[in-house]
Amino acid sequence: MKLLVTNDDGINSVFFHALVRALQAAGHELYVVAPLTEQSWTGASKTRHRAVQSAVADHGFGCPTWTVDGTPSDCVNIAIAHLLPVKVDAVVSGINVGFNCTLGFIVASGTVSAALEGTLHGLPAMALSQDVSEGVYYDLKEHGGKPGAELTATLQHSAAHAARLAGELLPKTPPRSFTVHNVNFPFPCRPDTVMKSTVPAHFFVPGLFTPPDADGRHKLIWCEGEDVSPPDLLTDLKCVEAGEISHTVLDYRKLGHA
């Protein structure tokens, strides 16, 4: 397939590079348009109050590559309208650092929202995320840490699963169906790790920010949250915590009640 590949952790993310390499190894034709800098937790936001700059980039992928100094949704919108020399078959977003499970996190995710932006252009789309521990997350995000041996191995396995799933799920997804395949990989992930169909966990996320400091500033923090899902529901969160790959079909046509 011809795939537009993006993420929300930025063009330099090791997790993103692993996905690009795996998709190429699977034979897909890639067009990379990713944020110039990290854009986690930006949801589906568009850059409203300034002009956004795109630029040709070379990160050794061997495929057409651009950066955009905006949000993941900016990347997809600008790519399809102005950058891509061909019409792509689908949008693939990820691999995100950390899971994108539960209602509380899916709606805030730049990774999922980049895939959603693809569906708003009539394309099938997939969002991919890798569960990591809180300590590993902050080491990678706040301190520029590098993945250790076990995480590196997991990442390679997750990326291989992602490339296989892109080839299996996206061609079966009708165009113009507003459908995102939200896939979350457990840690560790292995070649034989099974995938299960899930639904988003019902999850409250209060208290996402610290109390004000002396200057009245609040900082986003890790949130434990509260899972209020029915006990008989196989949720994305339960699946990942059980060491299995979670596959949730997000059909945005089903939002709302009659």
Image (cartoon, grey):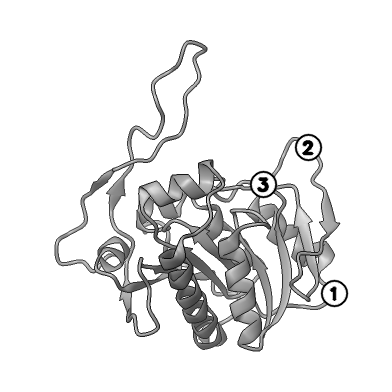
Q: Nearer the viewer, residue 200 or 15?
A: 15
Q: Which residue is mark 3?
A: 46
Structural distance between the alpha carbons of marks 3 and 2: 10 Å
Name the kind of residue labelled 1 in the image.
Answer: Pro
- Residue extending furthest left? 231
- Where is residue 195? Give x, y as percent: 34, 79
- Mark 2, residues whose alpha carbon is within 10 Å: few (<14), some, or many (≥20)? few
Which numbered marker is on residue 85? Answer: 1
Tag of residue 204: none
Q: Quadrant of the N terminus?
A: bottom right
Give the quarter of the image for residue 78. Answer: bottom right
Considering the numbered disc 3 on the image, is that residue within a helix, a strand or a loop?
Answer: loop
Residue 133: % across, % down: 36, 53
234 left or right, relative to 12 = left
Image coordinates of residue 190 in percent, x first then y, are 37, 78
Callout 1 crowding tier (Cα within 10 Å): few <14, some 14–19, many ≥20 = few
Amino acid bearing label 2: Arg
Nearer the observer: mark 1 or 3; the answer is 1
Kind of element beneath mark 2 = loop
Decide: marks 1, 3 in contact (CB < 8 A)?
A: no
* Residue position for label 2: 50
Amino acid type of the residue tagged 3 in the rendering:
Lys
As helix, strand or loop, the secondary structure at mark 1 comes to loop
- Cα–Cα span, label 2 and label 1: 26 Å
Q: Earlier in the sequence, mark 1 or mark 3?
A: 3
Name the residue: 75% across, 47% down.
Answer: 69
